[in-house]
Image: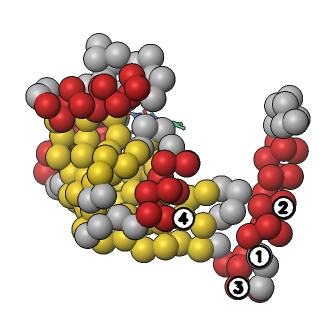
Amino acid sequence: MMLTADMQRVVTEQQLGFVATVTPEGRPNLSPKGTTAVWDDRHLWFADIASPGTVANLASNRWVEINVVDPIIRTGYRFRGQATVHREGPTYEEGLARMAAGGSTTGRDRVHSIVLVEIEDAEAVISPAYDSGANPSDVATRWLRHHADLHPEANTR
Ligand SMILES: Cc1cc2nc3c(=O)[nH]c(=O)nc-3n(C[C@H](O)[C@H](O)[C@H](O)COP(=O)(O)O)c2cc1C
């Protein structure tokens, strides 16, 4: 499937996906990937820097689900697809180049692989906060305050 412009916007803005795989025993494995990004209009990707469990699971089951949610607006997307792990070659090199272009200082010595996920299915996820008629600005105000209260040391302007 083609990733819509809004799907690509949310992934690019958030820079954080929660990636689910399945262990050989059939148990779920979920972990955050702050390198989650749009590769092209059919693929998402992330860098395996510290993800031995995810990559080991992909050896026996290539299916993944990735959730990307804006924690302030409290909407996002869940993406499902099959992953390929690139430990060398053009896709690995392109991933490293994109990381460097984005300002990352994480070099090839720390990037074990680039994981490319061909998205086969995606759907929006929306907080039940919207069920009662709240609008995005109400929700954003509430959760911006919540996060500012959690981090009083931060300079939030
Ligand atoms: C906010 C955040 C972002 C992270 N981003 C990445 C990432 O992009 N790539 C990576 O390999 N690990 C990343 N990690 C670390 C992994 O999530 C962590 O090592 C996790 O335990 C890996 O689990 P796994 O081996 O089951 O994949 C991140 C952790 C956090 C908290």
> Looking at the image, is mark 4 or mark 1 earlier in the sequence?
4
The residue tagged 3 is 131
The disc labelled 2 sits on which kind of residue? Arg
The residue tagged 2 is 142
Picture quarter with the C terminus: top right
Give the alpha-carbon distance from disc 4 to disc 2, as whole Å: 17 Å
Label ID, residue 135: 1
71 displayed left or right of 18 = right
Residue 154 horizontal/vertical position (percent): 82, 31
Give the alpha-carbon distance from disc 1 to disc 3, as whole Å: 10 Å
Query: CB atoms at circles 4 and 2 under 8 Å apart?
Result: no
The disc labelled 3 sits on which kind of residue? Asp
Can the viewer see residue 30 in this picture?
Answer: no
> Looking at the image, is mark 4 or mark 3 earlier in the sequence?
4
Give the alpha-carbon distance from disc 4 to disc 1, as whole Å: 15 Å
Above or below, comparing residue 117 to residue 101 in the picture: below
Query: CB atoms at circles 1 and 3 under 8 Å apart?
Result: no
18 displayed left or right of 131 = left
Q: Is mark 1 within 8 Å of ligand 1?
A: no
Query: CB atoms at circles 4 and 3 under 8 Å apart?
Result: no
Residue 71 horizontal/vertical position (percent): 65, 56
Category of crowding for the residue at label 4, using alpha-carbon neighbours closer than 10 angstroms: few (below 14), some (14–19), many (at least 20): many
Task: Classify residue 123 by image quadrant.
Answer: bottom left
Give the alpha-carbon distance from disc 1 to disc 2, as whole Å: 11 Å
The residue tagged 4 is 76
Give the alpha-carbon distance from disc 2 to disc 3, as whole Å: 16 Å
Category of crowding for the residue at label 3, using alpha-carbon neighbours closer than 10 angstroms: few (below 14), some (14–19), many (at least 20): few
Q: Quick one: SS at disc 4?
A: strand
Image-quarter location of ligand 1: top left
Category of crowding for the residue at label 2, using alpha-carbon neighbours closer than 10 angstroms: few (below 14), some (14–19), many (at least 20): few
